[in-house]
Amino acid sequence: MASGNSYRRGKVDRWAIGLSGLCMAHCLATALVFGAASAVGGLLHSPFIHEAGLVFAILLGGIALGRGIQVHGQKLPLAIGAVGLIVMAGALTMPHGNGEVGVTLIGVTLLGWGHYLNRRAVA
Protein backbone atom coordinates (compact mmCIF):
# COMPACT_ATOMS: atom_id res chain seq x y z
CA MET A 1 0.00 0.00 0.00
CA ALA A 2 1.33 3.43 -0.94
CA SER A 3 2.07 5.98 1.73
CA GLY A 4 0.27 9.32 1.82
CA ASN A 5 3.30 11.15 0.43
CA SER A 6 3.73 8.83 -2.56
CA TYR A 7 -0.02 9.07 -3.18
CA ARG A 8 0.14 12.87 -3.32
CA ARG A 9 3.27 12.83 -5.47
CA GLY A 10 1.63 10.47 -7.95
CA LYS A 11 -1.48 12.67 -8.14
CA VAL A 12 0.09 15.13 -10.58
CA ASP A 13 1.18 12.23 -12.76
CA ARG A 14 -2.40 10.93 -12.77
CA TRP A 15 -3.61 14.37 -13.88
CA ALA A 16 -0.94 14.47 -16.59
CA ILE A 17 -1.83 10.96 -17.79
CA GLY A 18 -5.45 12.07 -17.90
CA LEU A 19 -4.50 15.12 -19.97
CA SER A 20 -2.55 12.87 -22.33
CA GLY A 21 -5.63 10.69 -22.69
CA LEU A 22 -7.79 13.74 -23.37
CA CYS A 23 -5.32 14.89 -26.02
CA MET A 24 -5.42 11.48 -27.66
CA ALA A 25 -9.24 11.48 -27.59
CA HIS A 26 -9.26 15.03 -28.99
CA CYS A 27 -6.98 14.07 -31.89
CA LEU A 28 -8.99 10.98 -32.77
CA ALA A 29 -12.31 12.81 -32.37
CA THR A 30 -11.10 15.66 -34.55
CA ALA A 31 -10.08 13.32 -37.33
CA LEU A 32 -13.40 11.44 -37.19
CA VAL A 33 -15.73 14.35 -36.53
CA PHE A 34 -14.13 16.66 -39.08
CA GLY A 35 -15.10 14.32 -41.88
CA ALA A 36 -18.70 14.10 -40.64
CA ALA A 37 -19.37 17.65 -39.41
CA SER A 38 -17.16 20.46 -40.68
CA ALA A 39 -18.61 22.98 -38.20
CA VAL A 40 -17.55 20.92 -35.19
CA GLY A 41 -14.30 19.94 -36.89
CA GLY A 42 -13.46 23.60 -37.47
CA LEU A 43 -13.86 24.33 -33.77
CA LEU A 44 -11.74 21.36 -32.74
CA HIS A 45 -9.08 22.33 -35.28
CA SER A 46 -8.65 25.77 -33.74
CA PRO A 47 -4.94 26.56 -33.35
CA PHE A 48 -5.69 28.05 -29.92
CA ILE A 49 -6.92 24.68 -28.60
CA HIS A 50 -3.75 22.95 -29.78
CA GLU A 51 -1.44 25.64 -28.47
CA ALA A 52 -3.21 25.87 -25.10
CA GLY A 53 -3.17 22.08 -24.78
CA LEU A 54 0.57 21.99 -25.43
CA VAL A 55 1.15 24.73 -22.83
CA PHE A 56 -0.82 22.74 -20.23
CA ALA A 57 1.05 19.56 -21.17
CA ILE A 58 4.40 21.35 -20.77
CA LEU A 59 3.37 22.80 -17.40
CA LEU A 60 2.05 19.52 -16.00
CA GLY A 61 4.97 17.59 -17.47
CA GLY A 62 7.49 20.02 -16.01
CA ILE A 63 5.91 19.85 -12.57
CA ALA A 64 5.32 16.10 -12.40
CA LEU A 65 8.41 14.83 -14.21
CA GLY A 66 10.72 17.45 -12.68
CA ARG A 67 9.46 16.62 -9.21
CA GLY A 68 9.93 12.95 -9.98
CA ILE A 69 13.66 13.47 -10.48
CA GLN A 70 13.82 15.21 -7.09
CA VAL A 71 11.95 12.35 -5.40
CA HIS A 72 13.36 9.21 -7.05
CA GLY A 73 16.34 10.48 -9.07
CA GLN A 74 15.43 8.63 -12.27
CA LYS A 75 15.93 10.71 -15.41
CA LEU A 76 14.38 8.29 -17.93
CA PRO A 77 10.75 9.38 -17.31
CA LEU A 78 11.69 13.03 -17.88
CA ALA A 79 13.68 12.17 -21.00
CA ILE A 80 10.82 10.17 -22.54
CA GLY A 81 8.27 12.82 -21.56
CA ALA A 82 10.43 15.61 -23.01
CA VAL A 83 10.75 13.76 -26.32
CA GLY A 84 6.97 13.37 -26.34
CA LEU A 85 6.50 17.11 -25.79
CA ILE A 86 8.98 17.91 -28.57
CA VAL A 87 7.13 15.59 -30.95
CA MET A 88 3.81 17.21 -29.96
CA ALA A 89 5.25 20.67 -30.57
CA GLY A 90 6.55 19.53 -33.94
CA ALA A 91 3.07 18.34 -34.87
CA LEU A 92 1.81 21.91 -34.39
CA THR A 93 3.99 22.96 -37.33
CA MET A 94 2.37 20.42 -39.65
CA PRO A 95 -0.72 21.02 -41.79
CA HIS A 96 -3.89 19.48 -40.37
CA GLY A 97 -4.49 15.95 -41.54
CA ASN A 98 -3.64 12.34 -40.89
CA GLY A 99 0.09 13.02 -40.65
CA GLU A 100 -0.38 15.63 -37.94
CA VAL A 101 -2.73 13.36 -36.01
CA GLY A 102 -0.29 10.46 -36.22
CA VAL A 103 2.68 12.55 -35.06
CA THR A 104 0.60 14.04 -32.22
CA LEU A 105 -0.50 10.58 -31.09
CA ILE A 106 3.13 9.41 -31.03
CA GLY A 107 4.06 12.43 -28.91
CA VAL A 108 1.13 11.96 -26.53
CA THR A 109 1.96 8.27 -26.16
CA LEU A 110 5.59 9.06 -25.31
CA LEU A 111 4.53 11.74 -22.81
CA GLY A 112 2.02 9.40 -21.20
CA TRP A 113 4.66 6.67 -21.01
CA GLY A 114 7.05 9.07 -19.29
CA HIS A 115 4.36 9.94 -16.70
CA TYR A 116 3.57 6.25 -16.24
CA LEU A 117 7.25 5.45 -15.57
CA ASN A 118 7.50 8.44 -13.26
CA ARG A 119 4.45 7.34 -11.29
CA ARG A 120 5.78 3.79 -10.94
CA ALA A 121 9.13 5.08 -9.72
CA VAL A 122 7.48 7.33 -7.11
CA ALA A 123 5.07 4.72 -5.74
Image (spheres, rainbow, N blue to C red):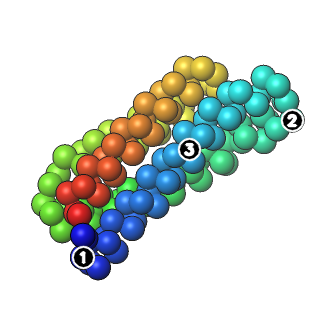
Residue at x 44%, y 52% (from the top left corner): 17
Does label 2 or label 1 sit earlier along the sequence? 1
Q: Give the image quarter of residue 68.
A: bottom left
Q: Is residue 65 left or right of residue 19?
A: left
**Res 28 → quadrant:** top right
Q: Vertically, is 122 above or below 96?
A: below
Q: Which mark is residue 3?
A: 1
Viewer-proximal residue, 14 or 61? Answer: 14
Of marks 2 and 1, the one in the foreground:
1
Q: CA distance from mark 3 to mark 1?
A: 30 Å
Q: Position of residue 59 (x, y in %)?
A: 44, 60
Identify the amino acid type marked 1: Ser
Between 120 and 42, which is closer to the camera in this rendering?
Answer: 120
Amino acid under label 3? Cys
Secondary structure of residue under mark 2: helix
Which residue of the protein is positioned furthest toward the bottom in this rendering? 4
Q: Split into 4 quadrants, where in the image is the C terminus?
A: bottom left
Label 3, secondary structure: give it. helix
Q: Depth-wise, is mark 3 or mark 1 nearer the camera?
A: 1
Is 69 rendered above or below residue 38?
below
Which label is found at residue 23? Answer: 3
Estimate the x, y position of residue 100 in percent, counting from the top left.
56, 26
Query: Left or right: where does residue 51 sit relative to residue 43?
Result: left
Q: Position of residue 21 (x, y in %)?
A: 52, 46
For disc 2, the marked residue is 39
Amino acid type, residue under disc 2 in the picture: Ala
Question: Viewed as shown, does residue 94 lie left or right of 64?
Answer: right
Asked whether residue 54 is in view, the answer is no
